Image (cartoon, rainbow, N blue to C red):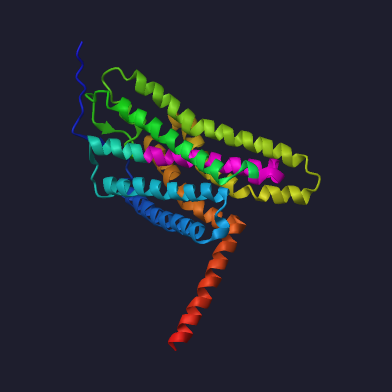
């Protein structure tokens, strides 16, 4: 039996609908714009410092650089389009553009989660095997881990795109979200969408919950190791090396856990705000957290400033 798969010429991203406070949502989009600017500047600064300082060319900062890159790309893929859609009322998006929008947004959001696993592996090896750390955490291992995560993300999202192109959208073309979200899209299908439903259940497990369980298990192992350390000062010193990573995990996962736990009881507009904030706020805060809580980056910034100052003074004296 021949089946015709209907591809609509465009989708409509609904966003906030039916709220008496619609005029105040414009301030929210202005807020997103400033969050985007801070995110771009912060992550670009972290990447620049890592590139310029040879002391930061360690396996750990391969993952930190990748996190900053993912945050930068994710914010750039999501925020300008969201602002264009809602602030300037361009909520019509073509079919192909929507699939592209979905692919890049999901890829970078997924990579944020998996990159936290790479950082947790670094902390786990540093605390459990301090004498063998440079053997267990090498550039080759960290590059391989990061590249594997990129491969996993791209393959899973390509599968999602293929499955989405196999369904008909004859019920409606209104996407009940703030971007081309997988769940609202596949729920518009009027033919058999069981494969997309199965993948929709597997993707959060693979991209969100399995990494979270892995990170929690790593910290259980870290806590068990630190409990055997006799000196409380050494225990606290070792724990402080994990505070930046713990902060990143909390900022990324806590809003998602709250939203998905109370999904049925949260109003649609509130859910959109929660999910959009969980997409744009972590990329803004991640570089701030690493600059404030990581001693190596603070020392690196001081070294770079000291190097530039004498050069500037020397050039000024030569001109005079």
Judge left or right: residue 64 versus residue 185: right
Judge left or right: residue 122 versus residue 266: right
Task: Judge whether residue 255 can be spotted in this image.
Answer: no
Residue farthest right in this picture: 230
Residue farthest bottom in this picture: 320
Please say if 42 is above or below 149.
below
Q: Residue 163 falls in which quadrant of the image?
A: top left
Residue at 25% across, 49% down: 88
Residue at 39% across, 35% down: 154
Residue 115 forms part of the magenta stretch: yes
Image coords of residue 100 (percent x, y): 29, 38
Image coords of residue 218 (percent x, y): 63, 36
Judge left or right: residue 15 versus residue 146: left
Residue at 49% across, 58% down: 51
Q: Residue 105 falls in which quadrant of the image?
A: top left
Q: Main secondary structure of the magenta part?
A: helix
Q: Nearer the viewer, residue 26 or 111?
A: 111
Number of numbered labels in the structure image: 0
Image coords of residue 45 (percent x, y): 46, 59
Quadrant of image for the C terminus: bottom left
Task: Judge whether residue 166 can be spotted in this image.
Answer: yes
Quadrant of image for the N terminus: top left
Q: Which residues are magenta?
A: 105-134
Judge left or right: residue 23 versus residue 270: left
Residue 16 forms part of the magenta stretch: no
Image coords of residue 178 (percent x, y): 33, 40
Please say if 78 is above or below 287.
above
Q: Nearer the viewer, residue 43 or 145?
A: 145
């Amino acid at each position: 039996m021949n089946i015709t798969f209907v591809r609509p010429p465009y989708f409509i991203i609904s966003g906030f609908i039916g709220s008496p406070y619609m005029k105040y949502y414009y301030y929210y989009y202005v807020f997103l714009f400033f969050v985007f600017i801070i995110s771009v500047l912060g992550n670009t600064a972290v990447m620049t410092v890592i590139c310029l300082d040879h002391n930061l060319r360690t396996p750990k900062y391969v993952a930190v650089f990748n996190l900053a890159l993912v945050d930068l790309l994710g914010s750039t893929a999501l925020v300008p389009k969201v602002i264009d859609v809602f602030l300037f009322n361009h909520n019509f998006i073509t079919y192909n553009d929507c699939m592209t929008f979905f692919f890049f947004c999901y890829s970078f959001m997924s990579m944020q989660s998996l990159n936290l696993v790479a950082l947790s592996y670094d902390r786990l090896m540093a605390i459990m095997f301090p004498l063998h750390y440079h053997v267990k955490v090498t550039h080759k291992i960290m590059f391989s881990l990061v590249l594997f995560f990129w491969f996993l993300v791209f393959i899973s999202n390509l599968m999602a795109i293929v499955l989405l192109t196999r369904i008909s959208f004859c019920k409606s073309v209104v996407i009940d979200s703030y971007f081309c979200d997988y769940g609202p899209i596949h729920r518009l299908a009027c033919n058999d969408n069981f494969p997309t439903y199965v993948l929709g259940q597997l993707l959060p497990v693979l991209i969100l919950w399995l990494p979270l369980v892995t990170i929690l298990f790593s910290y259980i192992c870290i806590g068990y190791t630190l409990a055997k350390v006799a000196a409380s000062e050494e225990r606290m010193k070792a724990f402080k090396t994990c505070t930046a990573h713990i902060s990143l995990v909390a900022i990324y996962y806590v809003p998602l856990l709250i939203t998905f736990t109370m999904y049925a009881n949260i109003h649609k507009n509130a859910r959109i705000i929660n999910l959009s904030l969980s997409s744009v706020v972590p990329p803004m805060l991640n570089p701030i957290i690493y600059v404030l809580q990581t001693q190596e980056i603070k020392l690196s910034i001081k070294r770079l400033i000291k190097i530039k100052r004498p050069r500037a003074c020397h050039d000024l004296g030569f001109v005079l």
